[in-house]
Image (tube, helix red, strand yellow):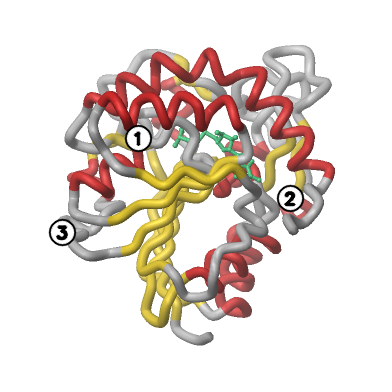
């Protein structure tokens, strides 16, 4: 039997089911790309190297797969891919696009914090704004570790903690004021904000991320702080281009499992 969903996962399931229509067009756009781009500034894969170039024979899982385009990129590189997502509606789009593009992806409706999948059943795990921001790190990082075989990789991209600290409490775009306690960063509830209400997100101070990785049995192989491209002028989601050229909006962690 599946574990009961924690409160934040119930809230986020409702939120994402209600938002899924708005993610169809971006999903379709991403599915058409052979070359991956990442995050809110569409940083090319050539800059971030999120995926192994050749994934032939690799068993890969996307934690919080949404419309499934990251899984499609892994399949195009030779992997077999499983995508788990908490929203049935997002998975409907993923299933339709997988069929239209002729890509086999196993799609599972569930919580990436407690997948119920067997131990050590994957070589590679990834999340782009999925579990990376919507799941409690103290649950999903150990779960990703359990799912990986020895030497397996976990790569994820999500909001940078500095951007969370500078995000006004009314839901507006990041400003130059520090509005939250950095050291208490963990659960961020965007449900009742005035501007663009959201769901329940998670983040940690950088030192706590690193402590969690080490306690869980991961080593950090690489870390990126993403800056908006110099030519960018638009506001994307929670940051203006001007802000994001000066401060990091996103972080990428690349981890390797070193102990079981
Ligand atoms: C922004 S999408 C990520 C997919 C894609 N990379 C993207 O950026 O559009 C966020 C996804 O995380 C999923 N999600 C939220 N909480 C989750 C959880 N506890 N377990 C699995 N998926 C979750 C949502 O349902 C949603 O489809």
**Local SS, label 3:** loop
Q: Which residue is mark 2?
A: 185
Toward the viewer: 118 or 184? Answer: 118
* Horizontal arrangement in the rendering, residue 188 relative to residue 83 (left or right): right
Whether the residue carrying mark 1 lies under 8 Å from ligand 1 is answered with yes
Disc number lying in front (2 or 1): 1
Sequence order check, earlier mark of 3 and 1: 3
Mark found first going from the N terminus, 2 or 1:
1
Q: Picture coordinates of residue 216 (x, y %)? A: 60, 77
Chain-order first, disc 2 or disc 3:
3
> In the drawing, what numbered circle is on residue 54?
3
* Res. 69 mark: 1
Location of the N terminus (image quadrant): bottom right
Q: How far apart are the alpha carbons under marks 3 and 1?
A: 17 Å
Seen at 51% across and 40% down, the residue is: 129
Between the C-alphas of marks 2 and 3, the distance is: 37 Å
Q: Visible in this render: residue 196?
A: yes
């Amino acid at each position: 039997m599946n574990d009961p969903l924690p409160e934040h996962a119930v809230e986020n399931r409702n939120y994402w089911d209600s938002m899924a229509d708005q993610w169809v067009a971006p999903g379709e756009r991403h599915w058409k790309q052979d070359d991956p781009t990442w995050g809110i500034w569409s940083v090319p894969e050539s800059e971030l190297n999120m995926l192994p170039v050749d994934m032939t024979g690799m068993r890969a899982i996307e934690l919080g797969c949404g419309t499934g385009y990251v899984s499609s990129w892994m399949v195009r590189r030779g992997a077999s891919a499983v995508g788990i997502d908490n929203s049935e509606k997002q998975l409907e789009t993923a299933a339709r696009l997988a069929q239209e593009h002729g890509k086999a992806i196993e799609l599972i409706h569930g919580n990436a914090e407690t997948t119920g999948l067997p131990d050590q059943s994957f070589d590679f795990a990834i999340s782009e704004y999925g579990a990376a921001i919507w799941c409690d790190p103290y649950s999903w990082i150990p779960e990703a570790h359990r799912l990986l075989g020895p030497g397996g990789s976990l790569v994820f991209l999500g909001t940078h903690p500095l951007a969370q600290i500078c995000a006004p409490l009314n839901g507006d775009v990041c400003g130059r004021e520090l509005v939250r306690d950095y050291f208490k960063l963990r659960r961020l509830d965007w449900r009742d904000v005035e501007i663009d209400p959201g769901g329940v997100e998670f983040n940690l101070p950088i030192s706590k991320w690193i402590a969690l990785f080490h306690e869980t049995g991961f080593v950090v192989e690489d870390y990126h702080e993403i800056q908006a491209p110099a030519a960018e002028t638009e506001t994307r989601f929670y940051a203006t281009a001007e802000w994001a050229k000066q401060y990091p909006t996103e972080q990428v962690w690349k981890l390797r499992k070193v102990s079981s």
